[in-house]
Image: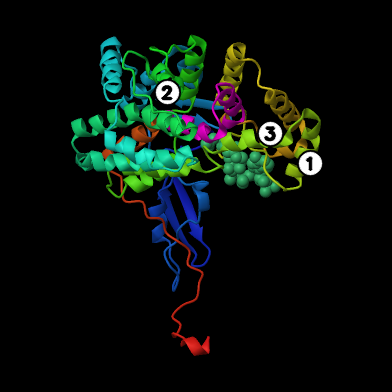
Amino acid sequence: MTDAPKADTLTVRDNRTGTEYEIAITDGHIKAADLKQIQAEGQPPLATYDPGFVNTASCRSTVTYIDGDAGILEYRGYPIEQLAENSTYLEVAYLLLNGELPNQQQLDTWVHDVTHHTFVHENLRTLMQGFRYDAHPMGMMQSAVSALSTFYPEAIDFSDKENRDLQITRMIAKMPTLGAWAFRHSQGKPYVYPDNDLSYAENFLAMLFKMSEPKYEADPRLVKALEVLFILHADHEQNCSANAVRSVGSSGVDPYSAVTAGIGALYGPLHGGANEAVLRMLRRIGTKDKVGEFIDGVKNGKERLMGFGHRVYKNYDPRAKIIKKATDDVFEVTGKNPLLEIATELEKIALEDEYFVSRKLYPNVDFYSGLIYEALQFPPEMFTVLFTIPRTSGWLAQWSEMVEDPDNKIARPKQVYVGERTRDFVAMDKR
Ligand code: CMC
C-alpha cells in the first residue's frame, strides 16, 4: 500500500481554542500573514517573534543561492568557484544585475559604460577633503555615497528602467574612486583621478598607489587577486547590509540613499567590519605561542574569535577556501605576512576544539582577507572599504529585484509590546 499524496499544507491546532487551521506551504515556506487568522478571544492575531530574522524569509529572490550546511554559494546559479576562476568582477556584476552572463558585445558595452562614469563631480572631492585627517574611510564612503544622491536628484525616478540602469552604472563606476580617495585622504596624499585606459581593478590600484610616475602599472598577479576578492564579496543574499538596502529602499528613496544604509550596516564588526577586527585580533595575539591562551579566553566567553562563525554557513565558508588559495598567490609577490602563522595556528586549534566543532564554527570570508589586504599595503581601516566596493553590485541587484517585485511593501516589522500601559502623567515634584 502506498501513502496517499500529502498536500502542501500545514495543519495547526490552537490549543487555546481547539480550532484547527490549514495553512498553505509554498516553496517550503508559510506566509506569516496566514497566521493572522489564528486568534483566541481577547488576544491579538497570532504572529511570529524572530529577532535577527533567524527563520524568516523577507523576500523571494533569484540573485544568490546559499546552502550553508553544504558550503555552497552560487550567483544566479553559477558556483562561486567557477566564477572566481574564470570571470572578471565586472562580468560578475553584470551577471548579478541582469541574471545572465554577458556575451562579448554586452560585456564590452558594460565595461565601457562603467569606465566612463568613474569621475566624480569636483564638489564631491571638496566635500571629501573637508574630513579630518584621521577620518575612518568607511565614514567618508558612507557620506560620499549619500552626497551622490544630491548630485543626481533624477535618481528618485527609478521606475524608469533606463534611468535606474544609469544610476547603477554610476554607482558601480564611482565606488573605487571614492574608496581610493578616502585612502589618499588618510595618507595626506593628493587624490588621483581615474585612468580610463585601465581595467576596473587596475584603475583602483592606480588611484590608490600612483605617485609621480606617468603611468601606474600594477603586478598582474595582484590585479588577479583583487578581482577574485571582488568576485567573492559581490553578493551574499539577505545579509545584514543587503537587508538594510532593501529595508531603506522599500520606502521609495533613491538608490544612493538606500546603498548608504548598506554601507552603514557593513561597517559593523559583526558584518564587513570583521576583516578589520580579525587583523587587530591577530596583532594583539602577537605570537603563535599565545594562541592557546587566546582560545581559552574565547571559550570562557571573554571575546569572540573574529573571522569565525556565520549565521548561514555551518560548514567551511566556500569563499574562505578560495581566499586561502589567493593568499598564496599574493604572498608570492609581497612576501609572507608574519601574521599568517598565527592565523594558521588559530584555525588548526579551532577546527579540532570541541567548543568550535560542536557550534559548527568555521573560518568565514573575513578570516584570511585581512592578511591579503595587509600584504597589499592597506591599513586595517581600509579593509571594509575593499568589501564595500564590490558589494555595491550585490546591493544594487537586490535593490533592483525589490523595486520590480510586485510583492514589495514598505519594510515595517511588528513588535511584541511588553511595556507599561495607559498610565497617568506624574508631575515633576512627584517623581
Ligand atoms: N567566536 C566564539 N564563539 C562564537 C563565535 C565566534 N566567532 N561565533 C559564534 N559563537 C558562539 C556563540 O557564542 C554561541 O554560543 P552559545 O550557543 O554557547 O551561546 C553560538 O556560537 C552561536 O552564535 P550566535 O551568535 O547565536 O550566531 P549568529 O548566527 O547570531 O552570529 C556571527 C553569526 C557571524 C555574527 C557570529 O558567528 C560572530 O560574531 N562571528 C565573529 C564575527 C565575524 O567573523 N563576522 C563576519 C561574518 S562573515 C562576513 C560578513 O557577514 O560580513
The residue that mark 2 highlights is 77
Q: CA distance from mark 2 to mark 1?
A: 41 Å
Give amino acid for label 2.
Gly
Establish if 366 lies above or below 246. above
Q: CA distance from mark 1 to mark 3?
A: 17 Å
Q: Residue at x 47, y 51 (%)?
A: 11
User: Badge 3, how many Cα within 10 Å: few under 14, some, many 20+?
Assistant: few
> Front-most of 31 and 365?
365
* Image spot of residue 188 (x, y percent): 46, 32
The residue that mark 3 highlights is 283
Colour setup of the view: rainbow
* Image spot of residue 314 (x, y percent): 61, 34
Q: Earlier in the sequence, mark 2 or mark 3?
A: 2
* Image spot of residue 364 (x, y percent): 59, 31
Q: Which residues are magenta?
A: 366-391
Examine the rendering and report whether any part of residue 109 can be seen. Answer: yes
Q: Which mark is residue 132?
A: none
Q: Which mark is residue 296?
A: 1
User: Does the segment drawn in magenta span residue 383?
Assistant: yes
Examine the rendering and report whether any part of residue 59 can be seen. Answer: no
* Image spot of residue 340 (x, y percent): 68, 23
Q: CA distance from mark 2 to mark 3?
A: 38 Å
**Secondary structure mainly formed by the magenta segment:** helix
Give amino acid for label 3.
Arg
> Front-most of 361 and 121?
121
Q: Quadrant of the N terminus?
A: top right
Q: Earlier in the sequence, mark 1 or mark 3?
A: 3
Q: Earlier in the sequence, mark 2 or mark 1?
A: 2
Q: Residue at x 47, y 28 (%)?
A: 233
Marks 1/3 in contact by CB < 8 Å: the verdict is no
Give amino acid for label 1.
Asp
